[in-house]
Amino acid sequence: MHLHHKLQELLHNNPVGAPKSEEFIEILEILFPPGEVEMALLLSFSFKKLGDIAKEAGIPEEEASRILEGMADKGTILSKKTGDGRVYALLPNYPGLFEYPIMKGMDAETQKRLGNLWHTYYMKDMVHELALADPPWKRVLPTEEAMTDEVLPYEVASELIRTKSKSICLGICPCRTIEQKCDKPTDTCLAFDGAADFMIERGIAKKITVEEAIEVLKRTEEAGLVHLGSNNKNNLLFICNYCPCCCHIFRQYTEFNYPQSIGKSSYLAGIQADECNGCGICAEERCPVKAIAMLNDVAALDSAKCIGCGLCVSTCPTKAISLLKREEYQEPPDTLNQLVQTVWKNKQEKNRSRR
Ligand code: SF4
Ligand code: SF4
């Protein structure tokens, strides 16, 4: 079997998935040229020691290190230093193989080709794979200014950043970089702890402070971007700041109509019709999921669509909108590991019942 087809199969064995497609094979051919694809096939999603990889490859450790370091520098594999030396692992498609190489940057022609391939692959195949994750991979972190009573600590992004994050980085948004459908800011992608350490070490993103990260939350809210974080309670893997037009993951909801593809916040917008002056800002400029429509010059909410992001609240000139607690709310799993295991178990059960 062709080496890149074997790599596709290996990557598909991650809970995130990497379905077969012509475009994905082309992506892998760009990201893993000859010499690197063989090394990638020796890796797994758990870290492996350099010495063990070199032994399996049948090459000296220095040569294996040169190849693997080059791959980690491009953002095609993961690496970290341990007391026992360097270790390496495969990256899943999202977040990882799609984001890191584009965030790192490459020549304009390759980036354009890669961007087009990821776009086609995502829209045709990956969108369906990711959207069926149960529970969803990502959840909405509401704007804090709009939050009211009964605040859930794991929904307060700034507190999670302040209390749970050991290191933080800021990089460019790969979706807006390749899609270019809007003029929203691109220096908006936050990652934390292990992911941040890797991205900082490899020049994929820059190290920032807690205060700078909280500033990113504020300016992305002003720009009308939705904060989505990994759908677990105990810490943050990343916070992406999404627009509905470019961002791959958010388009599962806004374009492909997968209502369960995003973990909604515990809030729902509430509109006081008698306070509304009919300006239309909430419906036309702020709501990213078209949950508000103007009916006879009064804002009206489609509660089934509302994700509880709070973006409509701060810009309402008459303070007619507030966030209210929703009645039905799916709590996130406690840890990232629990999220990954649950998605994987549910996916395998679904696949078994389809056979
Ligand atoms: S922004 Fe406020 S005042 Fe304007 S349409 Fe929406 S609810 Fe009404
Ligand atoms: S109505 Fe729209 S902008 Fe307001 S909270 Fe719901 S999804 Fe967000």
Image (cartoon, helix red, strand yellow):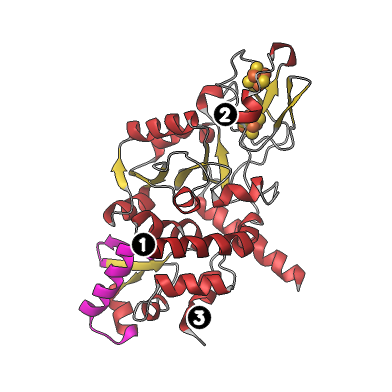
Badge 2: residue crowd in 10 Å (few <14, some 14–19, many ≥20): many
In the figure, is residue 177 to the left or right of 169? right
Please tell me which residue lies in front, 175 or 142: 175
Q: Position of residue 322 (x, y in %)?
A: 63, 20
Amino acid at circle 1:
Gly
At 44% from the left edge and 50% from the top edge, which residue is drawn?
Answer: 177
Residue where numbered disc 1 is placed: 75
At 53% from the left edge and 70% from the top edge, which residue is drawn?
Answer: 24
User: Which residues, given as a range, are shown in magenta?
Assistant: 57-85
**Residue occupying the far right of the picture:** 296
Sooner in the amino-acid sequence: mark 2 or mark 3: 3
Residue where numbered disc 3 is placed: 6
Distance CA(mark 1)–CA(mark 2): 33 Å
Please tell me which residue lies in front, 259 or 185: 185
Q: Position of residue 68 (x, y in %)?
A: 30, 72
Based on the picture, tell me whether residue 62 belongs to the magenta stretch: yes
Residue where numbered disc 2 is placed: 311
Q: Position of residue 60 (x, y in %)?
A: 23, 83
Which is more foreground, mark 2 or mark 3?
2
Query: Looking at the picture, does residue 63 appear above or below residue 70?
Result: below
Q: Secondary structure at mark 2?
A: loop
Q: Decide if residue 267 is in sight here.
A: no
Query: Looking at the picture, does residue 188 appear above or below residue 293?
Result: below
Query: Looking at the picture, does residue 311 appear above or below residue 208?
Result: above
Sooner in the amino-acid sequence: mark 1 or mark 2: 1
Amino acid at circle 2:
Leu
Q: Secondary structure at mark 3?
A: helix
At 28% from the left edge and 54% from the top edge, which residue is drawn?
Answer: 203
In the figure, is residue 347 to the left or right of 24? right
Q: Quadrant of ligand 1?
A: top right
Q: Position of residue 176 (x, y in %)?
A: 47, 48
